[in-house]
Image (tube, rainbow, N blue to C red):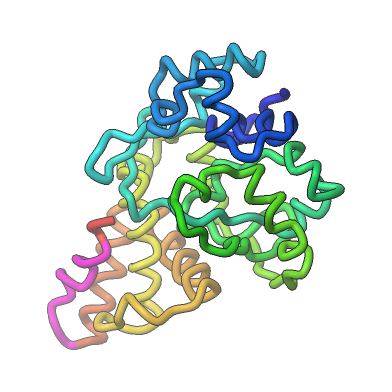
């Protein structure tokens, strides 16, 4: 089974299960005595075993696999994220990617999940310029982890989804590059991943709606726009952020030093 460069370990495990006709990834792992829970936690021993099973490079698989540290904390290489950084219980996909790569429901094993699809702040597909869609919710969290089985189950639903156009923005391009390739050496890269992404979105919200804007009640397209606005400031470093906050405080006629506090918690 070929491993795609952007594919995390649980997705790779789901595909041979689907290809071999197993009713679920859990059943497949039971049949071959594979340690599925350690793999979900991103433990190195389980990733090594999966790489051997799939015949792929273990370093490449580790590079895109998330380690659960416990208590809502996660690690991706030298980067850290919080529970709010991910769509952990819902699978998001680009409908157009699925249509191109999955000729029929029985061939769900052909499609690798993209690691970036798991991150809440990435909301569109840069290749096709459309919003990602959430597959219907499952009753059990373990079912939502079985990527290939979910694609097979919801194949017709995916085909019926309208393509909602959304222009790709530098903010999401930055996050995607960081997720797949690692941190750079800019000021933003010294912030943890969840802090950097949330700060861009909340700063953009404050710029667009004012310092007292509520965090709830915004559409996906709204958050795409807010993230782009905030990133346009934060990419230029702390001096640009200070100038932006000072301008917002001046416009509001008050000290704006605490206007971002809720959003910086990631």
Which quarter shows the C terminus? bottom left
Residue at the spot 21% in from the left edge and 73% down from the top edge? 259
Asked whether residue 262 is drawn in magenta, I would say: yes
Please provide the residue range marked out in magenta: 253-263
Residue at the spot 44% in from the left edge and 79% down from the top edge? 218
Asked whether residue 181 is drawn in magenta, I would say: no
Front-lying residue, 79 or 146: 146
Q: Is residue 266 above or below residue 46?
A: below
Q: Report the label total.
A: 0
Front-lying residue, 167 or 253: 167
Residue reaching furthest to the right = 103
Residue at the spot 27% in from the left edge and 64% down from the top edge? 263
Q: Is residue 185 above or below residue 246?
A: above
x%, y% of residue 8?
Answer: 55, 34
Residue at the spot 52% in from the left edge and 14% down from the top edge? 49
Name the chief secondary structure element in magenta: loop
Q: Is residue 10 left or right of residue 18?
A: left
Q: Is residue 76 left or right of residue 210?
A: right
Q: Is residue 59 left or right of residue 20?
A: left
Rendered image quadrant of residue 236: bottom left
Q: Is residue 201 left or right of residue 20?
A: left
x%, y% of residue 108?
Answer: 74, 43
Which quarter shows the N terminus? top right
Rendered image quadrant of residue 78: top left
x%, y% of residue 173?
Answer: 57, 50
x%, y% of residue 138?
Answer: 51, 58
């Amino acid at each position: 089974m070929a491993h795609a460069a952007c594919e995390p370990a649980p997705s790779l495990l789901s595909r041979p299960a689907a290809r071999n006709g197993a009713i679920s990834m859990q059943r497949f792992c039971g049949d071959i005595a594979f340690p599925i829970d350690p793999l979900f936690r991103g433990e190195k021993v389980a990733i090594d075993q999966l790489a051997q099973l799939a015949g792929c490079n273990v370093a490449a698989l580790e590079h895109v696999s998330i380690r659960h540290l416990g208590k809502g904390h996660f690690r991706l290489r030298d980067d850290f994220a919080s529970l709010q950084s991910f769509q952990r219980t819902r699978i998001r996909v680009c409908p157009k990617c699925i249509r191109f790569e999955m000729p029929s429901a029985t061939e769900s094993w052909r499609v690798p999940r993209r690691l970036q699809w798991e991150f809440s702040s990435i909301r569109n597909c840069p290749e096709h310029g459309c919003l990602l869609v959430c597959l219907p919710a499952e009753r059990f969290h373990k079912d939502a982890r079985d990527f290939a089985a979910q694609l097979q189950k919801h194949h017709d639903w995916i085909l019926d989804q309208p393509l909602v156009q959304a222009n790709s923005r530098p903010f999401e391009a930055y996050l995607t590059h960081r997720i797949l390739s690692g941190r750079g050496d800019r000021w933003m890269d010294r912030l943890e991943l969840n802090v950097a992404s949330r700060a861009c979105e909340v700063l953009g919200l404050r710029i667009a709606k004012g310092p007292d804007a509520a965090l709830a009640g915004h559409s996906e397209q709204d958050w795409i726009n807010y993230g782009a606005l905030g990133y346009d400031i934060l990419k230029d470093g702390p001096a640009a952020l200070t100038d932006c906050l000072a301008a917002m405080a001046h416009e509001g006629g008050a000290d704006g030093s605490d206007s971002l506090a809720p959003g910086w918690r990631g």
